[in-house]
Image (tube, coloured by chain):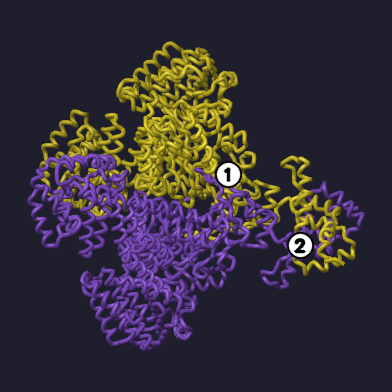
Chain colours: A yellow, B purple
Amino acid sequence: MASPCENVELFVDGELAPEDAESFRQHLPDCMRCQREVADLMQLRLLSRRHAEFAEAEPPRAPVPLFRRRPFMLGVAALAAALLVMVGVRLLRPSAPSHDVWLAQRPQRLLEARLGHPGADIHRPLAAKMMGGGGPLEDLPFDALAWLEREDAHGLAAAFLVRDDPGLADQALRKLEKLRRSPELDNDRAVALLLKGRPDEALRLLDAVLREHPRHAQALWNRALALRELGLSLMAARTFSEVTALREPGWSEEARQKAEALRRTTFERRDRWMAAFQSGLALLEAPPAILPEGFSQLPIARLFFYNAIRAAPNRERVLELLPLARELDARAGNGVLEGYVRRVAEADFSRRAPLARHYAAHVREHPPREEQERIIKALLQSREDDILLGSLATWDASTRHLELYTAKAAATGDLWFQLHAAQERAKAELAAGDTERAIRTLLDARKLCPARGMEYRCLFLERDLSHLYNQRYMAEAALAHAKKGWSDARAANEWNLEGDLLWMLSQVSRIVNDASLTRAYLGEYLERGRGNPVDEHRVHQHLASMAFQELRVDEARREMDAALATGLPLTSAGALVLADISRLKRAPGDEAHLKRALDAARPSLSAGGRAVATHILGRFYIEQDAGRGRDLLWRAIQEAEVPGLEEDSLARRARAYSYTSLLHDAGRRGDFKEALELFSRERGLKPPGQCLLAISADSERTLLLALSPSGELLGHFDESRRHPLPERLDGVVPEKLLAVLRGCSRVEVLARPPLHGRAGLLPPELAWSYLTRTTPPPAQRTGPAVHLVVSDVAVELSPDSPLKRLNAWTPGFGPDEQRVTLSGTEATPHRVLAAMKDATEIDLVTHGIISGHANTSFLLLAPGPEGAELRVPQVRGASLRGAPFVVLAACHAAHTAYSFDSPFSLPVSFIEAGARGVLAATVEIPDLEAESFFNAVRERIRSGAPPAIALRDERVRWLGQKQGAAWLESVLLFE
Amino acid sequence: MASPCENVELFVDGELAPEDAESFRQHLPDCMRCQREVADLMQLRLLSRRHAEFAEAEPPRAPVPLFRRRPFMLGVAALAAALLVMVGVRLLRPSAPSHDVWLAQRPQRLLEARLGHPGADIHRPLAAKMMGGGGPLEDLPFDALAWLEREDAHGLAAAFLVRDDPGLADQALRKLEKLRRSPELDNDRAVALLLKGRPDEALRLLDAVLREHPRHAQALWNRALALRELGLSLMAARTFSEVTALREPGWSEEARQKAEALRRTTFERRDRWMAAFQSGLALLEAPPAILPEGFSQLPIARLFFYNAIRAAPNRERVLELLPLARELDARAGNGVLEGYVRRVAEADFSRRAPLARHYAAHVREHPPREEQERIIKALLQSREDDILLGSLATWDASTRHLELYTAKAAATGDLWFQLHAAQERAKAELAAGDTERAIRTLLDARKLCPARGMEYRCLFLERDLSHLYNQRYMAEAALAHAKKGWSDARAANEWNLEGDLLWMLSQVSRIVNDASLTRAYLGEYLERGRGNPVDEHRVHQHLASMAFQELRVDEARREMDAALATGLPLTSAGALVLADISRLKRAPGDEAHLKRALDAARPSLSAGGRAVATHILGRFYIEQDAGRGRDLLWRAIQEAEVPGLEEDSLARRARAYSYTSLLHDAGRRGDFKEALELFSRERGLKPPGQCLLAISADSERTLLLALSPSGELLGHFDESRRHPLPERLDGVVPEKLLAVLRGCSRVEVLARPPLHGRAGLLPPELAWSYLTRTTPPPAQRTGPAVHLVVSDVAVELSPDSPLKRLNAWTPGFGPDEQRVTLSGTEATPHRVLAAMKDATEIDLVTHGIISGHANTSFLLLAPGPEGAELRVPQVRGASLRGAPFVVLAACHAAHTAYSFDSPFSLPVSFIEAGARGVLAATVEIPDLEAESFFNAVRERIRSGAPPAIALRDERVRWLGQKQGAAWLESVLLFE
């Protein structure tokens, strides 16, 4: 007989005679080779069976019989008793996994958040946490996970999440992404984001769930957690209380305790501050014995100390303040205040006492302007400089007498006054319209922070910097200062400034269009200021504006009415929203409210602000008295175009918004010729006479114009939209217009913000580009091409960042190009900017990142002393003398921030700095593919193709070869 | 007939008659309840079977039959044809998982690193990376993972790692931790650490593997990656070249390319710097036409510019430098240098030219001191202040004429000189022994950095700060400055300073005892300076010292001989090591080398340095001429104890090391009485006369003394150790001594560094504490107890940190205690320090973290303007007037940094600041358990138990109830 090994196949197929099968079985244990072959063969058999089965199409969510997935065991079963097993197993699908996958049987839960999956949402107290390291991880039960993957994909994600392991959050997210949306799934996505330390994104998801299902217990709970992580304790407490109200066993009580603790600690902080504040005020008259314990730990204490010394009527009172001076000096680590006390104690109180008394009186009630000037003169003649300084500061007279204040402040040798003088200087500079200079002044002063004992002054610097950056739409910088200030204010329990900084945070999230976060900040602000009409008034106006922006007109009307109900006149911004709301849901008093608001605001308006006021009226009236409205809007444009206002953000807004109103008015009238003329006038540069697509959108309205190859004009206007436009614009251009544009060899797109720079506007087979430049194109420099390639950048990858080290990049140089490369640790923003100056072709190859908080993208370069990020403001400030064509080979480089007056993105900033064209993608792109794609486009351009056509041809080639991924269509050209 | 559901059990057990079974089968599909019960019952049957089987002990790694692990399927199989299956399945264990778990069949690999698991180490090119986000994750094949978990745990870890997903690295580490150590497993642990962004820890593991297996391909490859991540390109290249030499297909070529690219970019940088440096030097005589492209981008360019202007012999040469001045001004963003050029151009060159010529000559060759003074006087009389400044700086005369230099520097209005003057001032302050003041001076100057154009000066500040902090053993701060400086130097390509900062990095890792990292830094330094005897000399001395510290005596000898081979005299530090090496492996020339080193060093030694020199001689001679050695050691102690040297780190070292030598000498002689006397003298405070354990260890030597309850002295000395002592000291005290100590109600332990503060020294049933105080105990304040509890701290948890939010903490106050709490955002280091001042009981409850880079632990508090970390130096600087008993409820709070002269830890710093006792753990502790444990210990102390006994009693109670985890034994008491 031959070797038993030859019987393997027969054995597996059950075709061996019984005695042969038995002898083979006897042989098997000693023969590794046969064992191996039996296994392989069974796998093969199974595989072919499975393929056959899969060929019969089955509905994707139908229960998949267990046996189909278990090749080995099924093989065995088949071998043994196929029929019986077929019947038996098919029905034996268990209705739950075999293992405690959701750790539901443990007495304590690991995850603080709540999951939407019912198997994983069982209340138990929280487990102990390690007071340092991360603690041991939980074992993953793979068999059970495999079961879940087949039977309960949501449960699989939940199994990852219950382990409270941030490392598994991505796995969970990935599973959840593949499932259809539901409140429970979105809730669990939010939990994954919480685990990943991204409470703001979690909040967005949860708010969406709660908008549809306001009593969704898990979403409410997690929203409270997200709010708590964001530091918004009162909003978190409020949300926990909503959970308590649902009366679920366990959860309800835990939520109650959490809400109670959050409120207690927050209000306890407030009460301590209030008490100190009141006693600080009282110090003007009373001796320091009244001060509460720990008074000197509050940053504002130093302010009250100065006031008390200035107001002290005699030597004794001054000396009573010596212990406080010493405490404050100890905080600051010097002896400045003790010296001050001793000097004042030596003063001649026969002369000083009346001045001190006046001072005390005038702190509470400011005298009229002329009286102030008289007193200042008198104080100048006396030698009581400290009272002079105090009077100037208290009456806000320090900006009027800036040089005097600065000199006297410097003479004190006290950092406090130096910092305050800088703050006042910045205020004066801002009033003179020089925001940039004001920012520099504050930044210079801020170099002296942190300074012990000066926390109060440093907080003001953060607040004012945040405000100024916000006005300039520099959200990233505004946010950094607001956050730093807020954190420092909370650390020092400087309650009032904490509120100011909270407000700044809401304003930053407002300009980056993060509705959820803005509502959360505003909500917290409101909770802190409950019952204060001024706070309620400003908050509700903002909420109205946000609701309108999302086209939730009823909600906007409600919020607006709440603001009006406080009886206070609207701000300009509020009036602007009212004009909009009034278009879609008018109320009888709107006109009166509008006028009252503008009348109240007018005296204090700057030139730019006046243009905005005119615009608001125009925007309101054009809906009822079109001629009057149009006149007002044109006047607003005139007012905004007055020389000197080029950089004034209010004037720019007034101009852009007025054109918006006029454009859509023309569109509604079907006067597309006038609309085209308006596009042209606004841009200040005549657009091409053919193959043009012009587009504008405003709230519910969309206006599109197309010029055919022969210059024929087609238009389209619509005002029925009730949802904001999506990020990608596929399908926005109606077929009628597309048909006209298909005849063009290339199309130029004039897109007004916020549409400029979005992908998908035109189909991939068209060659098109965004018309970005608003000035005539720069003359390209003659001489040889200088091609700069920045690649292989030594980026610092922190372990928590998902970024990977990129593959080496092979630059694609042309034969006649002068080659310049910059790479490694030297490719810092500073060096890159310097190297770009004279290049005619630039490839920047590195990671591109959307900064979620600022809704802008930046390039990550090698870290230099001033950071590693190349951002819009730096590029804008560059001067690209070689009028380069720029390729941004990086993810998201074309991402455009949400803004209504001018587009804000890297490509736009390159064009502003002098680039003749920019190629960039709005989404993520892979490096190896990007290398071939962009180098091929470059090669086509070098061979003479216009960039738009080079891009289209290469794109079509890739799509044809099916190499193409979604990212191909999001590579955009800006010219 | 009853309901078919009653037949479930019979059906499962196969005891149903055929027709009943068939009818049950018909019933099954429609009955959820029966399906469920069938499944449950089968599981039950299986489970009982499995337990029975497990009872037969089987070798842990023997192949586990597949069927034992698959409850359901086996149930089915058993049901179907038990016998056949039993035989068939048992043998059917497949030899590989059913799925491509290691992604080995893909054309590209995701992971750059190499794995020790053979299935996962197949060469393919690297896959594309997303140029922004993280890119899609790979699906986890759970079935296959389940198989791996049973059959191939190493393969399971590898399956996690090949996916290049940092989120899975912890899972992989966890699996690997459970396996026995092997080179392959350690390699894969290192890969996980690389994924987690911890190249330094990866390096440590890989070095250990390579020490045993120097040609381990995967470990070599990964070591190269770790080195590259650390920025050590030449060492990385060298290591990649070692991989190339192994000639593995694919890997060898990729390694070659990587090595080549690393070398090319590094040497290209060096060459560019060298060229610029040479031309900068030449600028003293030649016109600026010689300068290479981009010269002004180098930070050092400004230095050469000043020199060139000072040395310019006429107006024309000065004006030729105008374009360079403008370029440098453009970098700095001002017009300082252009103004300087124009001023000098107006000078009277009939007077200036000779001075300029002198200057040019003296830059290259410094004149003797007297000549310098003469020239300085002459320059003072001329009005050529710039040449005066330059001369002072170039000749290092600026510290001698500090006030003059400072004044003239300030007069230039040029930040460059202001920064340089600060650097020189710090140098003078250091020379005067005031390190603290020097640090302040540098920190103040550093506030002006980063300053564009001043990078060169700012780099010096970082370098000098790192050096000073390092001298003060403040590794964390030293590291921060070295890293910042190194990164900035690399960004600016300031090659020479980059080397200086690399050296500083090696020195920091040296003092924190990170041998792997130190070797890597020193290696890179050596690669950069190949062929330079000065560099080789200093590197080999350090390597010798490190090898000896690890008790690798042969290696230490080899490195020492390499250092000596350069022919240069050893430094003091080198001589100290030679004295040690010589004890265990003497060479004939040692005495001569030692004397030569000390003679060479002596002229420039400070008082502390002289004490060290005396000590070195003593340490050397005591091994051959004990009397002479002892005399020298006592002299060293005298020299170190001279008043004024209390804070001098060299003097402290000389004193501590001398006692070490004397102690172990006494121990070797068996004179334990003298040893006890030495312990007492060193401490300066008489230790208790009974129930004392004293311990000292030095390299290979250990000395232990025990005093019995009756004061009887027992000793133990050993010099046979050939491995450094482990972190835990279990078993170090011999039973003979333990027996004596068991009679004590409590034991006080006098442990010299580096043993002070380690866990496990005495068994848990003894009541013991570390005797930490070196001054008489503070008188406890009378009056009511003030109990401060800092808990529920609003710690900032970054998403990449493993830390979790702690559970709420319930403070345990005594009935008569005045309660003070601090929590939330206000629990900042500053506020905590302030609140501790007057407390008599302090509980600090928060996360404790070991900073791996500095080998010290700190407490994480709420972020204040000056950070969130409470570290040793801050605590040391505090004044705890209430002589509090302190409980540090945090992980690792008792962790003690490695140091030979004085223990460096949080508990020690609290004792130094005035605490009467400190309770803290060396390892991780869970919060809920910590709460009950520490509050119970507090309660026992309040009831009158001495802390050591309170701690022991509670510990024993917990251990008795088996609640106790390992952490219980690592809670230590310091008194």
Q: Which quadrant of the figure contains the C terminus of chain A?
A: top left
> How crowded is the residue under tag 2: few (<14 C-alpha within 10 Å), some, or many (20+)?
many
**Hey, which quadrant is residue B568 in on the image?**
bottom left
In-image side of B110 versus B582 (left or right): right
Residue A128 percent coordinates (x, y): 53, 59
Badge number at residue A189 = 1
* Mark 1 Cα-neighbour bin, 10 Å: few <14, some 14–19, many ≥20: many
Residue B231: quadrant of the picture: bottom left
Front residue of this view, candidates B824 and A438: A438
Q: Chain of mark 1?
A: A
* Labels in figure, total: 2
Q: Does residue B805 appear in this view? A: no
In the image, taking residue B277 as reference, residue A386 lies left or right, namely left
Mark 2 vs mark 1, CA separation in Å: 41 Å
- Give me the disc on residue B92: 2
| Mark 2 element type | loop
Checking the image for residue A528, the label placed there is none
